[in-house]
Amino acid sequence: MCGIVGYIGRKEAYPILIKGLQRLEYRGYDSAGLALISEQSQLNVYKAKGKVADLEAYCSEKDISGYVGIAHTRWATHGEPSSVNAHPHFSASGRLALIHNGIIENYQTLKDKLSKRGIAFRSATDTEVLVQLIEYIMISNNLELLEAVQVALHQVIGAYAIAILDRNHPDTIICARQSSPLVVGLGSDGSFYLASDASPIAEYTDQVVYLNDGDIAVLQEGETLHVVNIDNVTQHPKVKQIDVTLGQLEKGGYPYFMLKEIFEQPGCLRDCMRGRINADRDKITLSAVIDFREKLVSARRIIIVGCGTSWHAGLIGKQLFESLCRIPVEVEYASEFRYREPVIFPDDVVIAISQSGETADTLAAIELARKSGAFVFGICNAIGASIPRQTSTGVYIHVGPEIGVASTKAFTGQVTVLSMLALTLANERHTISEEMYKEMVVELTQIPDKMEQALKTNEQIERLAPIFTYAKNCLYLGRGYNYPVALEGALKLKEISYIHAEGYPAAEMKHGPIALIDSEMPVFVIATRDKLYEKVISNIQEVRARGGRVTALVTEGDERITQIADHVIELPDTLECFQPLMVSIPLQLLAYHIAVCKGKDVDRPRNLAKSVTVE
Ligand code: F6R
């Protein structure tokens, strides 16, 4: 949700900024812009509606010289996508340029105040108010930029990661964060890199500082990083090492990141289990559980919070914890939970699931749970993000950077971590037998190999995909562990192909959605061999009887469904609770190939952004 990049050092800033924007484009792609301080100390700002490539084209004949610059890729909140509303925004005098990720909630009040004092606004954004306010305070109180930023941020309500250039101080970038991520990279040559996440920084340095809420950092080439808070108290940030490799940030020969990430899943799950499941495959060790055993094992209840795909993973977690550990579980949309005045007990364990670790609603749900005294456990992918830093403990899913906007490998990574956690707690609570525990651990370690088999359905699915491009609506049906996978399959299709789709528990269909079924309606049924298999066959018959067109995902060797479905996709057998890991693969591939057939930009679906850092 908006991406920020910055550089100050001895290299030309422009190529670093453009490359950084390309890496962050998954965060927003309706417009982009950059500001550079030229060799003649001019503050040049260039902006363009559309993608980073449009900005590059716009800059092709401009003065792009300079060793200091900031850049931004936008996901619009206030004000339509346009070059005027794109960042950076100038102050009234043109001395300051500012970029911003987040939302200034009291921008209208501040704007009204400044307008009364004669300041004219050029854009419809909430961001412009920040740069105007900072300059107004600076001039009217005769303050230095840093002091003016501190005074201004005292007046601001909302979320922000900002970076500011001052024409009069061409040797400095000032940046600040509150509830929106910001990472500073420390170059070995005294340079500084700045970004919303570590991906634009990784190719230049592995030394980074993740700014904390309330931090304001002053970046000056050759100087040590100076961090203060809004009350000017010096902060002592920790330098961390990032472990992102360049290969993880490139498409690696695939046409889209999404396809690469789908195919990466077997390796990702091996990474996720590495060091956590022993070589004999009979023991799972999660350090978070060792450190907080008592809290977790004696949980009276688990509340899982998350959004979108992470919420779907939570629904699978509910079934795992309830059936294996016999702990009652509630799964909540973080966005609802935070405003619902939920009852939270001190002996509840709240599990927050998030790929990005920056989702604003999930962070707010964590805050609420913490205030209620609950123990908060994070399941996250992005290393060093806000959620792992704000939870009591947690587990990284370790699937590597997920760049495709539609989540794929993060989902299966989340389900794998939930499976390991549920098995660990079940073993500790003696709610499953030792034999069953071991059998399940062994099976979990076999999932990556079975996923490789499941990925072989790719060609079949690619051939089938054109049949579905005409569809206006699709139905996804599943039961038990596969019901959340039906929801997730429908979400994938909606996101990237813009076909309306609904996920439904198969047996609920006759309570309403069956009215929608006709020969135009593709119905995807998850019908793997499990305890509800016979029931799902009846559900397929109900669809067939109304002329519906059934594509069934079945366990390999299934002969009965082959007789009644229009198409079958065969998948390796596994335990019922791990079937979501298998079934997700063809559903992700289906969404992908349908979207590609429809000519959609799979990695940059309209209106979406990868990291939802605003409410
Ligand atoms: C769907 C998708 C979103 C995210 C949701 C939560 O493909 O990516 O639904 O799952 O925005 O994001 P995280 O997991 O980063 O909190």
Image (spheres, helix red, strand yellow):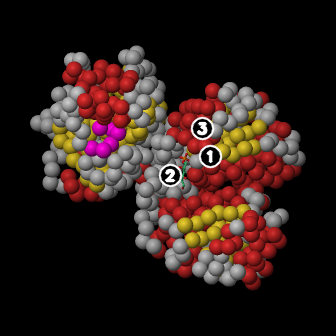
Between disc 2 and disc 3, the foreground one is: 3
Q: Is mark 3 within 8 Å of ligand 1?
A: no
Q: CA distance from mark 2 to mark 3?
A: 29 Å
- Residue indicated by mark 3: 339
Residue 232 lies, in percent from the top left, at 37, 17
**Residue at point 68%, 36% (across, down):** 342
Q: Label 1 sits on what residue type?
A: Tyr
Mark 1 beta carbon near ligand 1 (under 8 Å): no
Mark closer to the chain start, 2 or 3: 3
* Distance from Cα at disc 3 to Cα at disc 1: 11 Å
> Is 282 on the left or on the right of 140, as rendered?
right
Residue at x-position 51% and y-position 61%: 495
Residue that extends furthest to the front in the rendered view of this protein: 116
Tag shown at residue 402: 2
Range drawn in magenta? 123-128
Q: Amino acid at mark 2?
A: Glu
Q: Secondary structure at mark 1?
A: strand
- Please, what is the three-letter code of the amino acid marked with disc 3? Tyr
